[in-house]
């Protein structure tokens, strides 16, 4: 248990940040899942639209520190590659 007032505050702040970060990660995962579902369903137009929304979400997640910059870039790249491989 925290003894000093600064340690108690740090615990409170960490709790708030954890909640915010969980929400950010969840939003990123949801955006990526929408792209993957559209690709699996074979809907290229929907997949492209979903990727257009997912790419900024991934970049924002990297910028905010909830995921590594290279991980975000890799996911965007792989999703783009899967969409380009689809039949028109």
Image (cartoon, rainbow, N blue to C red):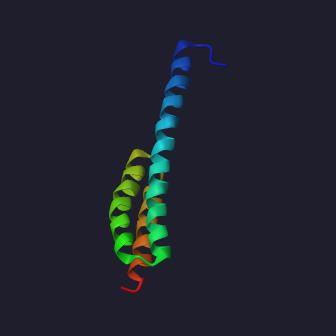
**Image quadrant occupied by the C terminus:** bottom left
Q: Residue at x 49, y 26 (%)?
A: 13
**Nearest to the observer: residue 41 or residue 87:** 41
Residue 68 in view, yes or no: no
Give residue 68's position: percent from left, percent from top: 47, 54
Could you say where residue 5 lies in the image, as x and y percent from the top left?
A: 54, 13
In the image shown, does 31 or 56 lie closer to the viewer? 31
- Farthest-out residue, bottom: 87
Between 15 and 5, the one lying in front of the other is 15
Q: Residue at x 41, y 64 (%)?
A: 73
On the image, the x and y values in percent for residue 52 come to 32, 64
Left/right placement of residue 73 relative to residue 12 reads: left
Instruction: Please tell me in which quadrant of the rendered image residue 56 appears.
Output: bottom left
Q: Which of these two is toward me, 38 or 11?
A: 38
Let me know if residue 5 appears in the view. Answer: yes
Number of marks:
0
Residue at position x 52%, y 30% in the image: 14
Quadrant of the rendering where the N terminus is positioned: top right
Instruction: Give residue 69's quadrant in the image.
Output: bottom left
């Amino acid at each position: 248990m925290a003894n000093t007032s600064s340690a108690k505050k740090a615990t409170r702040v960490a709790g708030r940040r954890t909640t915010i970060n969980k929400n950010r990660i969840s939003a990123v995962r949801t955006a990526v899942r929408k792209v993957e579902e559209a690709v699996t369903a074979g809907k290229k137009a929907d997949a492209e639209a979903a990727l257009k929304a997912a790419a900024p979400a991934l970049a924002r997640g990297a910028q905010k520190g909830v995921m590594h910059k290279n991980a975000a870039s890799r996911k965007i790249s792989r999703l783009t590659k899967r969409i380009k491989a689809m039949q028109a």
